Amino acid sequence: MKVGVYFPGSSPQSGGGFTFGHEILQALLALCEGSHHEFTLYFHRLPTVTANPLPAAKNLQSRWVDSKEYPPAYKILVSRLARKLSYPQPVINHKGILQTALEADDIQMFWFVTPEYQTVDVPYIATMWDIQHRLQPWFPEVSRAGEWDHREKIFARFLRQATYIITPNQTGQDELSMFYQIPPARFRRLRHPVPYIEKRPTKEEVASILEKYHISNRYIFYPAQFWAHKNHINLLKAFSFLHENYNLDLDLVFTGSDKGNLEYIKNTVKNLQMNEKVHFLGFVPHDDLIALYAGAFALTYVTYFGPENLPPLEAFACGCPVIASAYAGAKEQLVDTEHLVDGSKPEEIGLAIKKIHESPHLREKLIRKGLVRAKEYSGLDYVRDVLTMFDEFEVIRSTWL
């Protein structure tokens, strides 16, 4: 079967989407020659997960596609306006650039590796991470400036027309099924793969990175873009609670790009009189990020959004213990629920940190469990499961030209 795979434009600054895309690309390149399918990879003409030359193998080719196109609503509006003004109907490519490329390559099944979707007219696999605009629409990043309507219009069609939908766990499947009335048989639950880390950094390498960023004290790490739903504010309140009540000598290190909430977070740090204890590093390169995980006393991932998240998995692989919020899906994704906390309760977050701080044995136990969890499901495992989906659908696809 001729299979197309879509990698949207992504840069390292985009965070987890870039990491996931890179992991899947490397796994697909490693496994494709063991498959009898023929693969064409489509890369958007933006900073992406690969560099020139594009990857190729015995049964794999790649091409750039500039798949930006006018949305269907715009095409309809232009046609109606032309008709009302008695102008000639404009010639509009209703197929879209990506669909035209798929027809030229005779693609029989298509895989959207991420939720970045373009309109296509071939059977496809949709990858869906979350629908938080439906579950928590009060957060500005999923509601303001028409964002809610934009997501809903895209996802409603994208999901309902998909041949298969990849979702990370049962929680994700239940949410999608409830809001979009999709039969259970069309879901495939594939866990978020743990990123491959070739070598954990040495103590000397970690020390060098900490010196680079002027971090001299033990620290709690939170790598997250500065969105409201990432819940930096309650984590700061938790730290203030620890310092005021227990004089706990830990710093807090933030990494990530500003998504509109950074100034508010910095003002909160100032109001809590914690400027000396909180470090804002901005975007950091991947190798630096891994060293920051390895050097951290613990990761606190207190987001409100689920049903899965990448940083706890990265922390597991780096030997960093994890305190996470009990977001919907957390128990399925992280397995060990010993340190899931209510992200809306700063004192509960703070006491979880204090508990690990007071028990080196407990901290080491969490590290050991995390390292075991990190080895359970990789990018290679994920792609093998997707290849099985291609095999499954091939029998059905053989019933027409």
Image (cartoon, grey):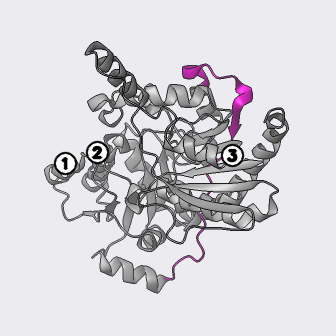
Reading the image, the residue beneath label 3 is: 106
The reply, left or right, for residue 216 in relation to residue 29 is: left
Reading the image, the residue beneath label 1 is: 268
Q: Amino acid at mark 3?
A: Asp
Q: What SS does tag 2 mark?
A: helix
Membership of 272 in magenta stretch: no
Crowd tier of the residue under label 2, counting other residues whose Cα lies within 10 Å: few below 14, some 14–19, many 20 or above: some
Marks 1 and 2: CB-CB under 8 Å? yes
Q: Amino acid at mark 2?
A: Ile
The reply, left or right, for residue 162 in relation to residue 292 is: right
Crowd tier of the residue under label 1, counting other residues whose Cα lies within 10 Å: few below 14, some 14–19, many 20 or above: some
Using the image, determine if residue 105 lies above or below residue 218.
Answer: above
Classified by dominant secondary structure, the portion drawn in magenta counts as: loop
Can you tell which of label 2 and label 3 is closer to the viewer? 3
CA gap, disc 2 and disc 3 = 51 Å
Q: What segment carries the magenta color?
A: 177-202
User: Does residue 321 appear in the picture of this structure?
Assistant: no
Reading the image, the residue beneath label 2 is: 233
